[in-house]
Structure formats: structure tokens, C-alpha cells
Amino acid sequence: MQQSDKVCVASRYIPFKKYHIAELSDLSPEAIKSAARTARKKYNDREELKQSTALNFISKKLGATGGFAGYSKLYQSEIKPFMDQYGLKHREDLIKPRCEWCPSVNISPAQIADQLFLGHGKQVTRLFTGYDVDWAGIDAAFYKKQQRSSFMNISNPIHRFDLVEQCNSLIREHPFEEDWYPEHPANEVIQMIRVHLISDSRSTLAGTYFPENEFTSERVLALYCDNTYALELHREDRDRLLRNLEVFRKWMAAVPMGWVDVLRFNDNLIFLRGADGAYDFLIRKAKDRPFVHQVGENLKQKHTPKSNDAYHYNRWLYFEYDGWKEMDAHKAEELHYAKGGTAKDYPQDALKQYLIDQGVYTSPEKTASPSDAYQQPTEDFHRLTLGGRGVYVSDLISIDQFSEFMKDPQCDYRLEREEVKNVECWKSPNQNSSDLPASVTWCDANAYAAWVSQKCGLPVRLLKESEYYEMYKQAANPYQFKGWLYAPHCDIGPGLEGWIAENSHLSEYELTWNSTFRCEQVQHPGGVTICRNYRFGEWINERGCVVNTAFLGSLVYPELSAQRAYWSETLTGEYKLMRIGFRLCYLADAE
């Protein structure tokens, strides 16, 4: 399969402490000046940034002393001679695969940089990125059974290589254990490359690059053991995986393409060298893309409640966090299972909570009492104790309350919402009695919370998943709490079998959307009303997460937690003949 050698070379984005970002595509002094201008004009924050300050900051990030003048001297006296010495002539993307068709081949410059600068890859001199492998050609040959042609990029004679012949030879010399003998051995090689080594797969390695060096005891396997995984079986799988990876290392050592040399210039700058003078570079803690100043794809920051710290956390992670993200995420997952967690309830914010527990990140929190509101809220709040803290929780927001928000001429959210593509209409599912719970998108729920916060002066947000479950357990009898997430053998949820049978004369449409729609109601001792129905969910604070109020898991996949199987933030549930409501909360002042 013929493919293009033209690959857009990705820029490196250098974050400033004051939220400016420099976009760097080259290492010349002229490129540094251009990057400083992007930090001041294109990716700038409210605080003014001087050109000289930006130049000096970028120079320091590249390991130079003496500001921009020092970098100019360093470039002429050391960087250029270094590039000449190693034959680094023209910059190319040596990380991104040449074929966009194969999305499972996924590796980022930031992932490689973190491992080389911060991880166990400090002694690595050569690594496999697979950048010049024709993945589409291989798939076409093996999966689509088309006539086999050359599998690799053959623009250069050194790349002419018969993968099938080589794989057949290698598999005889270095066989894998157990079920590693497909009809076409090369097929298995590609699966190993794509799934286990250079894909963004944390089920195998905490790290996605493949070094040429031997695997060592420091090699970190992300093969997790939850309480449903027998310890002995886990050990056997881990040992077998390590042995197979060692075999695979021998296989890849014989493959001439897809490899790049690692050339360290200093503690902040690394060059990657490919064939024919091609090179790329990595900068310590540089990012792959600019920061996006909104919480979700369809929710602007101004329509997000300030007490939802998702934006604050993401901004901190981008501009201030100096750790190895992939490794910390790996440790967070290990800790989750060590505490008795399972794969089905692995939380979306596990890394965030881990960094909070380690004292690395501090979540900003605001508390209030009803007397702090400068305008009395129309919502009814009830004081509960959740997580050992006082929390004011509202009843479900009604259609009438949400309609008032959408009609407010002072709020431009409705107009902006109409411009967003692929978002469900908010009016269609909200034509029932005005006192019934509104059915909205996750973006709608957050925008409503921000509106109430601005109008009433209360730091409101949506309930977190852990808060919702605790509230539910306080309201329901123990036997009622056994939903799918907590009782895997439960078929349709507690108490609903009789209800469904009694209403079986109703169609699915009538059951959910007409005035005949009813939910079982549970009264919390603190006054909050909880509605339960296997077709009714509640949005929670975590992005795109909705809890099934009957099964206490995700709305559509109740055997998994809401954070494990989250939804699109632009859905109201209507297309699934479901409804999704929401309620507000805020932390109470300490007594």
C-alpha cells in the first residue's frame, strides 16, 4: 500500500507558571523569538508578558544559562555542532505513525519525554516508535486478506523487508508461550506492537515506548490485581507476560524500521534520530498541545460553577505539576485495587484523588450557609452529613426551575447551546408537568449550577459520585442498596420487578416520557427525596457521569460505575428512552 512520507511535524508547547504557553517548532534563536511571541500574543494569559521575559524563560527550559543571549551562544557553540556531529539535518515527526488509518497505534511525545527524563529510561539509547511502519498495509494483508505487497515504507532501500518471512523464522527460534501461534505469525507481531507496546494501553505497561535495552526488574507492569483476580493467577499471568515481552524484544531487535536513536544533549533536551538525517526533539515537561480553557468540549469555563474544581485541576496539571503523570496514574490504580476496589468501579478521578492524598495537589473548596446567599435560592436545600462533612443538598431540579434559567435574558448559555452540534434538544424531554424533574445534558446541569451560584452567591455544584452513594445508603434500608454495582448477580435491581409487572401495559415511550411516568421515591432522614427508576439517572460532578438511580451503577451499563462507563455530556437520555436529572449541593460552614 503506497503511503506519503509527508508528516506534519508537531510543535512542542512550553507552559509558563503564569499560564502563558510558547509554541516551539524549531531550536534556532529565530524560532525561540517566534515562540516567545506566541506566548505573549497567541497563548497568553491576562497578565502582560515582556518579550525579554519570555525569551529568557524558554532559554532556561532548554537548559541554557544567561538568558536568551546565553542560549544564542549555546546554539552556535554546542547545539549546531552536536547536530552536525550526529547528522541531524531536517526535522521530521519520528513518533507519529505514517498512517492515520490505524488509531490503535498511539504514542505521544510527552509520554516518551516523561519516561526518558523522569522514568526508568534514562539509560535508553534506542527505542521503537513504529513511525515508518505501514500499519494499514499490514492490516490490509492480514485482516482483509488482500494480496500481500510490501509492508514497510520502501522509499529507502534499507527499509525493504519481508515481515512475514522474518516472523516465521523468529517464531521458530523464539516462540511465545501458550496461544501465540496464529495462522499468520506476523499477525501476532503486529498485535503485540499495537496493543502491548506502542499503543496507549495501560493494561500492560506503565509506559508506551519500547527500548532496545534488556527488560530489567525496574520495568513496571500495569497488570492489576483486584479482589476478583486470584493472587496466584495474577502472579502466573505477570510472569508469563514478562517472558513473552522478553521474547518480543528479541523479535523487534531484528526489525530494521520503526527504531530511533536517543541522543541526550542535556537534562532538558533530547534528540531522536531516524534515517537519512531525519530528527525530532523532546523537551522536559513540554506538552503535546495547547491548554483548552473549558471543562468539556461543549462547556465554556464561564458556564461552569467555580466550586467544581475540574478546570482548576486541569490547569494545575498542565502548568504546575512537575511529576511523571503516567507513573502517578499507575500508582493511583495500584492503590485503588489495594484498598479493595475493582475494575468496574475504577474512578475517573483516581489520579486526582491520589495527588490530593499525597499532598501534591490541593483542591480549592468554598463553604457557605444559607444566610450567605444575597438572593434566596428557589431550590430547597437540606443539610446532610456526607463524608464526615456538612453538605447542603437540593431536591431534583424541576422542569419549571430549569425553564426559568433557559429563559433568563441575562444568561447567554441558551444562545451558545443552539450553536453546538450534536447536542440533544432540551425542550423535547421537558414537556411533562412542570414540577417533575428536568431531563438535561451534563453541560446543562453545570451551566444551571453556575447560574445559581452567580445569582444567589452560593458555591453550588453537582454531587460527587461518592457523595451520591452515601446519601443513597443513608436513605435506603440495607437490602435496598444492593444494585448491580454492588450485587453482580442482581438482574433488574431491588424492588423494581413488581413495579415493572404492574405497569407492563405501558409502552416503553409511555413508561418514560408521558405523564404516566412514575418513580419510586425514597425519603432521606434529612428531607431529601430520592427517585428510583431503572430508566432514570442523575448527573454527578465528574465529567459526563450519570448514576442509574435503581442499579447504582452507570445509567446504561449498571454493572459498571458511573465514572467507569461515562456518557456523552451532550445527551439528555431521550434517544435511549431515559431521563437524566440533577440536583445541586454546596459545603456547609464548619460548626
Image (spheres, rainbow, N blue to C red):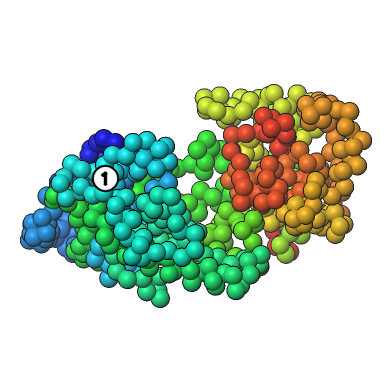
Q: Is residue 417 left or right of residue 258?
A: right
Residue at image x 40%, y 38%? 145
Whole-percent x, y for residue 284 in the image: 30, 60
Considering the image in quadrants, where does the N terminus appear? top left
Work out whether residue 123 or residue 302 is closer to the camera in this orientation and state it: 123
Whole-percent x, y for residue 511 in the image: 82, 30
Residue at image x 17%, y 56%? 68
Work out whether residue 105 or residue 466 is closer to the camera in this orientation and state it: 105
Work out whether residue 285 or residue 48 is closer to the camera in this orientation and state it: 285
The residue singled out by tag 1 in the image is 152
For disc 1, the neighbor class at 10 Å (few under 14, some 14 to 19, many from 20) is: many
Considering the image in quadrants, where does the C terminus appear? bottom right
Q: Quadrant of residue 34?
A: top left
Q: Is residue 541 left or right of residue 358?
A: right
Whole-percent x, y for residue 139 in the image: 38, 42
Q: Is residue 393 above or below residue 241?
A: above
Residue at image x 63%, y 70%? 230
Q: Is residue 417 left or right of residue 21?
A: right
Work out whether residue 91 or residue 300 is closer to the camera in this orientation and state it: 91
Q: Quadrant of residue 567?
A: top right
Task: Residue 173: tell me if it is visible.
Answer: yes
Residue at image x 80%, y 46%? 492
Q: Is residue 322 above or below residue 382?
A: below
Q: Is residue 352 left or right of residue 127?
A: right
Secondary structure of the residue carrying tag 1 is: loop
Q: Amino acid at mark 1?
A: Met
